[in-house]
Image (cartoon, coloured by chain):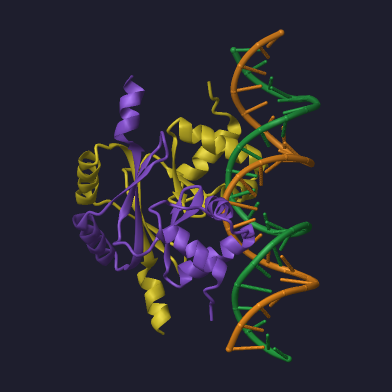
Chain colours: A purple, B yellow, C orange, D green
Amino acid sequence: MKKLTTQRQAMLDMINQSNTHWDAELLARALNDAGYSIGIATIYRGLTALEEAGLIHAIHLGDKKRYERSDKAHHDHLICRACGKIEEFYEPQIEQCQKQVADAHQFLMQGHQLLIFGMCDGCVQQGEG
Amino acid sequence: MKKLTTQRQAMLDMINQSNTHWDAELLARALNDAGYSIGIATIYRGLTALEEAGLIHAIHLGDKKRYERSDKAHHDHLICRACGKIEEFYEPQIEQCQKQVADAHQFLMQGHQLLIFGMCDGCVQQGEG
DNA sequence: ATGCCTGCAAAAGATTTGCACGCCA
DNA sequence: TGGCGTGCAAATCTTTTGCAGGCAT
């Protein structure tokens, strides 16, 4: 059985206290800044354990794996290519369409990931300046 | 200006002749099997060049980058977690919803990627056996 | 000559793993 | 005492890059 050790608790707290989309290194740095000293391997193993336990949620964003709180309703992501900002959205109509698509393909849907790439409002303004 | 050399032509042909979702190593192996001897670095550089030229299309599928023909209509992917098979689909309603979501967030949509994870029919059958 | 292309090997970044040690039931 | 967690360093995997030629214009 997986244990929720002090360090994993710290990781979980850090993730739960924010809306950030953490990657392993970011989290390691934040925890070290917060006074914990946790090896990077422990971070990776801990993140995997927390994910398996359903305590955090993972998204594989192109280059690297990110983690976010799981105590949130399901949502998808808008990703600004200019500044890297990640916004969240939830569109029930899309969710429903996906189920229909899966059914039509006799495909048992277990999950999905929708990423919308583009530029956020702020970056569009700047780009035009 | 990028050149369409013999090797890049071979890469392009290989990709165009199939519906496979190639990664760099798979493509290298296939080309070597076909009699070409192309270094892996050339494959990577070639794939990047072909993608920039719009001749092939890239999807970042979780772990690694894959490439497929670009002379196909836009589509999204159903991915079987059991056997790795990738099916394609196109659902105009989803496309349209995405635009609306982007607009609602004052987000300039440049592209998107929708992956549906689950199990294909064949694997479901097997799993139940 | 110049610019882009190639191969190889080395480097890079992200993640995993081997190993020895430590903690707690 | 056995199992899981930890740290470190080494290994792995995918991708990029440096460098020394090579080909075509």
x, y percent for residue A116: 33, 45
x, y percent for residue A35: 58, 56
Which residue corresponds to the image point at 35% horizontal and 60% vertical from the top-left? A112
Q: Quadrant of residue D12?
A: bottom right
Which quadrant: the N terminus of chain A?
A: bottom right
Reply above or below: B100 against B127: above
In the foreground, C3 or A76: A76
Q: Is residue A41 left or right of residue B90?
A: right
In the foreground, B83 or A9: A9
Q: Is residue A83 left or right of residue D22?
A: left
x, y percent for residue B4: 54, 28
Inspect this view and state whether residue B38 appears. no
x, y percent for residue A57: 41, 62
Q: Is residue A66 left or right of residue B78?
A: right
User: Total marks drawn?
Assistant: 0
Which residue corresponds to the image point at 47% horizontal and 71% vertical from the top-left? A52
Which quadrant: the C terminus of chain A?
A: top left
Which residue corresponds to the image point at 50% horizontal and 34% vertical from the top-left? B50
Inspect this view and state whether residue B56 appears. yes
In the foreground, B32 or A78: A78
